[in-house]
Image: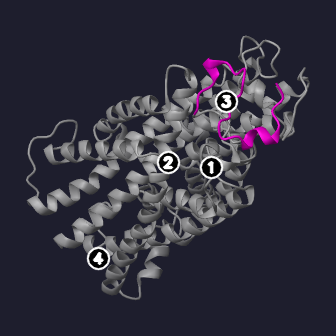
Amino acid sequence: MTLRRNDLDDADLTLAGADPSLFNEDLAPLPPSKRTWGWFAIFNVWSNDIQSLAGYTLAASLFITAGINGWFVFAAILLSGFIIKILVDLSGRPSVKYGFPFPVLARASMGVRGAQFPAIVRAVVAIFWYGAQTYFASTAISLALNAVLGRPGGPEFLGMDWVAWLSYVIASALQVALFLGGIERIAAFLNIAGPAVYLVMIALLVAIWVQVGAELPQAVGTIFSREDVTGWAAFSAFAGVTGTMVAYFAAVVINFGDFARNVRTERAMRFGNLTGLPLSLALFTFLSVFITAGAYLLYQNGQGEPLTNPADIVGLVDNVPLTVLAAVTFLVATLGINVVANFIPPSYSLSNISPDKISFRKAGMITAVAGFVIGALWVAVIANIGLPKFVDTLGAVLAPLYGIIIADYYFVRKQRLNLHDLYSISPQGAYYFTDGWNRRALVAFALAAVFSVLAVWLPQLAQLSGFAWILGAALGALFHWLAMRKFVVQTSLQDR
């Protein structure tokens, strides 16, 4: 079967002859007639991804721990926004062109069966993030309940009292309900959530700035900087902030095609990425850094551990209506992006494992249950390793996969894919390799992943920890290209 461009205009596209174990409605190429997103939808995806409580906590943690001038931290995070923009332009282009989600693109490099491996890895990483973000969302509910109930406290289990547990269950249930509403309802939800978060954060910053006074901008630059962090140490800290922020977005970077497939044109995708990444990230980081520094001076008198969760900062204001309003806003933002970034992608990935048996919704329920367990362990177990290291580790695992998939599409395949063979289990198919698995790609992943993960955890490689994601992706791409450069695809490729 040869798939022509006109075939993609058919709303009932079924890819005649597609193997049922590789195909269902959610994995099929999305025809142009069903692509309804413009640049603003992509802008909202990124804006809401940035605006989560976990995103604020990470930015604040890096601001506090980097040891360099706060304005350099701001510049490092802004630089990461431009890097991510370039990365998602690359990973989103194939899905805009062909209309398929990330797991199908992965079949070209990993094999039609081997694509289950990156899909599972991506799903596991997303489930960890889903659990973490669910916990952070629940802290907003806890903030509101404690403000209304007067902090009743009580016995704790796994580091959380009954209010925290109730809040966690409510947050989990709300996310499932949002997911079941479908992608269009989620997009409409994000259109409301994004601006609301900025309004609350700006109001909070104004309230703090008025009380702290004109010295706040200077304090941002010096309050957490250390005199011993100079020269190479300062550069390494700058690179570490940039690398950690890139790793924070790694889960969305690799599967950005799950969203890009809904966009009408590549130009709209690129503009949405530009406005939604560097620009939104700059505004959110500015607010996060100033609020963190101002709250430290105003509420803690420059003493003790600085607060990195905005919900905790709002709780110090001692104003119940404001606390409840802020809690609802933070909750809405975190729920929205958690569904987009950490619920939908693993649902596609798990569905790809057995499309004829695992539907998109069934995969979503698997994600919800597994993520609930992860989030329940956040306080007692996972938080002990620290959010930056948690982020770097998950990013280091995904980095080689991104490099392999991008190198394969742009350098091995020259941006030309055979859609039929992506859904075919025929041994003559272009992406069948050995029993459906590309062993070359698996070896490339293993070699690159070992290095990128060790760069995060091995003390001897501590100076490279800030480069873990970039090095992992570069090595994955290099090893895959070296392994595949003499590989000749024995099939004609029909481009759109």
User: Could you say which disc has been placed on residue 298 in the image?
Assistant: 4
Q: Is disc 1 placed on a helix, strand or loop?
A: loop
Q: Marks 3 and 4, how far apart in space? A: 61 Å
Mark sitting earlier along the chain (1/3): 3
**Residue 493 vertical placement versus 267 (above, below):** above
Q: Earlier in the sequence, mark 4 or mark 2?
A: 2
**Tag 4: amino acid:** Leu
Read off the residue under disc 3.
14
Q: Which residue is pictured at 63% across the width and 48% down the height?
A: 34
Q: Give the range drawn in magenta.
A: 1-25
Q: Position of residue 25 (x, y in %)?
A: 58, 32
Where residue 366 sits: x, y (%)? 40, 28
Which secondary structure, mark 2? helix
Q: Please tell me which residue lies in front, 291 or 215.
A: 291
Q: Name the residue under label 1.
A: 262
Which image quarter holds the N terminus?
top right
Say what amino acid the circle numbered 2 marks. Answer: Ile
Q: What number of labels is visible? A: 4
Q: Left or right: 375 with respect to 78?
A: left
Point out the frontmost of discs 1 and 3.
3
Q: How crowded is mark 4: few (under 14 residues within 10 Å), some or many (20 or more)?
A: some
- Residue 309: image quadrant is bottom left
Residue 15 sits inside the magenta stretch: yes
> Residue at coordinates 29% horizontally, 42% vertically from top-left?
173
Give the residue drawn at x 67%, y 38%. Answer: 100
Q: In which quarter of the image is the C terminus?
A: top right
